[in-house]
Image (cartoon, rainbow, N blue to C red):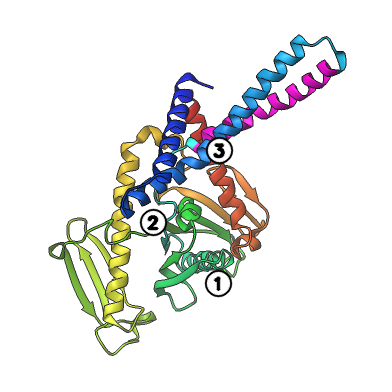
Amino acid sequence: MEAGLEARLQQLRRRHAELGAALSGSGLGGAAIKKLAKEYSELTPIVAELDALAQAQGEIVSLSEMAQSTDDAELKGLAEEELRSWRQRLPTLESRVKLALLPKDADDARNAILEVRAGTGGDEAALFAAELFRMYQRYAGLRGWQFEVLDLSETGIGGFKEASASISGRDVFARLKFESGVHRVQRVPETEAGGRIHTSAATVAVLPEAEEVDVRLDDKDLRIDVFRASGPGGQSVNTTDSAVRITHLPSGLVVIQQDEKSQHKNKARALKVLRSRLYEMERQARDDARAADRKSQVGSGDRSERIRTYNFPQGRVTDHRINLTLYKIDKVMSGEALDEIIEAISAEDQAARLAAVAE
């Protein structure tokens, strides 16, 4: 293993031991203990992998010496056989140590705001947007996550111009963050008399859900308008001015919420979405500033990037970032097979970042 990496590992081991000693004889206050305990728990899996690697390296040295020093042919053969086994395991153990050292995405444990919008393709694009939205809803259900619809803008024929939801549960953003981008569909629309295949698209954005402490909103930066909510075709669905439009003046971002009958609830939801969009803008700016790191990531998270094609006539789903094709479109759309794509992308991202660490 590289000398610089070895030195860093030893430094982490010493820090882990220091933290363990500080926690066991602690005369510290609650907040200080919590901070030390968090750092200790983050270092513990790294040290465990490091111990496993150190054990393997020790066994290799010991068995090499035994194989070279013994005159007993049988003992020599056993030592060489076991030595080969340990040497085969060594690269895997080294990779696991490097993997444990990879910087964690601080937002992985967050909940997420999902936004799906119809793109090119008219009514067909809106229908596809609705299907994508329901796909994520089913997937959330399969994972035991809570899926709360925030806003729906329907077309009247079952499609969604745009839809948003708050998804909460364990590691939501970690699993969904690679879903942002353009999703393309190829199929024969029900309205197409000639049976021709059309190509339409919808845009998905997955934002880490921000708390009030993450993004502070100044009242003077907000313009809040209230109006009467309306349904498809302009039909009134409310007799009070409960819908809320919040404009963030510095950025120009506009958020509208009208699904709740309560103006207070719509305002709270709109602020929640606005914070998450502003937080994502800051996050994207940080990523742009680390341009070199972007080369080791799978996709940029850019909403204009075409990431996946759903071809219904052929029953296939292709993720263009990793050239993965699954011939199980029904199971993907039902949420059952979505994990296969998500895990493959996560593994590819992990491998790319590991390669970058090794450079």
Residue 216 lies in quadrant: bottom left
The residue under the point 86% across, 13% down is 73
Please state the extent of the stretch shown in magenta in the rendering. Answer: 75-100
Tell me which residue sits at (58%, 49%) in the image.
343
Say which amino acid is labelled 2.
Answer: Pro
Q: Is residue 56 visible?
A: yes
- Quadrant (top left/top right/bottom left/bottom right) for the N terminus: top right
Give SS at disc 3: helix
As measured in the structure, the alpha-carbon distance from the residue carrying label 1 to the one carrying label 2 is: 37 Å
Query: Residue 178: x, y in percent?
Result: 48, 50
Q: Which mark is first along the chain, 3 or 2?
A: 3
Point out the tag, 1 or 2, that comes first from the N-terminus: 1
- For this rendering, which residue is in front, 224 or 28? 28
Query: Does the CB distance between marks 3 and 1 fall below 8 Å?
Result: no
Spatial CA distance of label 3 from label 1 is 59 Å
Mark sitting earlier along the chain (3/1): 3
Rate crowding at label 3 as few (under 14), some (14 to 19) or many (20 or more) other CA atoms within 10 Å: some
Say whether residue 243 is left or right of residue 98: left
Q: Residue at x 44, y 54 (%)?
A: 109
The residue identified by callout 2 is 208
Q: Taking 330 as reference, is 169 left or right? A: left
Identify the residue under disc 1: 191
